[in-house]
Image (cartoon, rainbow, N blue to C red):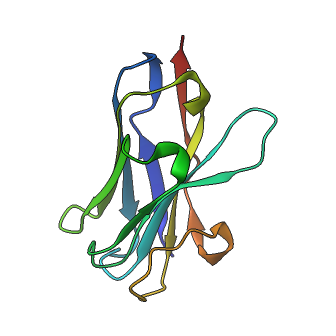
Amino acid sequence: QVQLVESGGGLVQAGGSLRLSCAASGRTISRYAMGWFRQAPGKEREFVAAINWSGGSTSNADSVKERFTISRDNSKNTVYLQMNSLKPEDTAVYYCAASDNTGWAPLRDQYEYDYWGQGTRVTVSS
């Protein structure tokens, strides 16, 4: 079992930055694909960014390209989401997810993931 705990959310003004962290425990995630998803009030959960197990391949949703960067530090068993130039429409609960898929391609489909964190709330004020 993998336990995931997100942190780093909060309230920020539009144009600001936040860095979310996802700390894993229970198992090393060095062979796990990781992803970030978000769910805004009244909307379905959507893909944000993903990184393959090695960190050699990443993928972003079109809505966050050029603004968000996913990375991982396997020595710390942690995945990050650097969010820059935040917009009010980025307001959501952000979830970290892990999959034991060891393929090269990052996973954009939430149903590919086996483990989920409880989420961290991000609020961007205009």
Residue 41 position, x and y percent, is: 75, 32
Report whether residue 95 is seen. no
Q: Please give the name of the residue rendered at 38% of the width and 40% of the height, measured from the top-left corner.
A: 67
Q: Name the outermost residue toward the bottom.
A: 103
| Frontmost residue, 26 versus 24 | 24
| Frontmost residue, 2 versus 9 | 9
Q: Is residue 11 left or right of residue 88?
A: left
* Vertical order, 60 against 90 (above or below): below
Q: Please give the name of the residue rendered at 54% of the width and 13% of the height, measured from the top-left corner.
A: 125
| Frontmost residue, 8 versus 47 | 47
Q: For residue 75, what is the image quadrant?
A: bottom left
Residue 27 position, x and y percent, is: 37, 75
* Vertical order, 54 against 69 (above or below): below
* Vertical order, 110 against 65 (above or below): below
Residue 10 position, x and y percent, is: 46, 24
Q: Please give the name of the residue rendered at 59% of the width and 48% of the height, measured from the top-left corner.
A: 118
Residue 72 position, x and y percent, is: 27, 61
Q: For residue 53, what is the image quadrant?
A: bottom left
* Vertical order, 102 against 54 (above or below): below
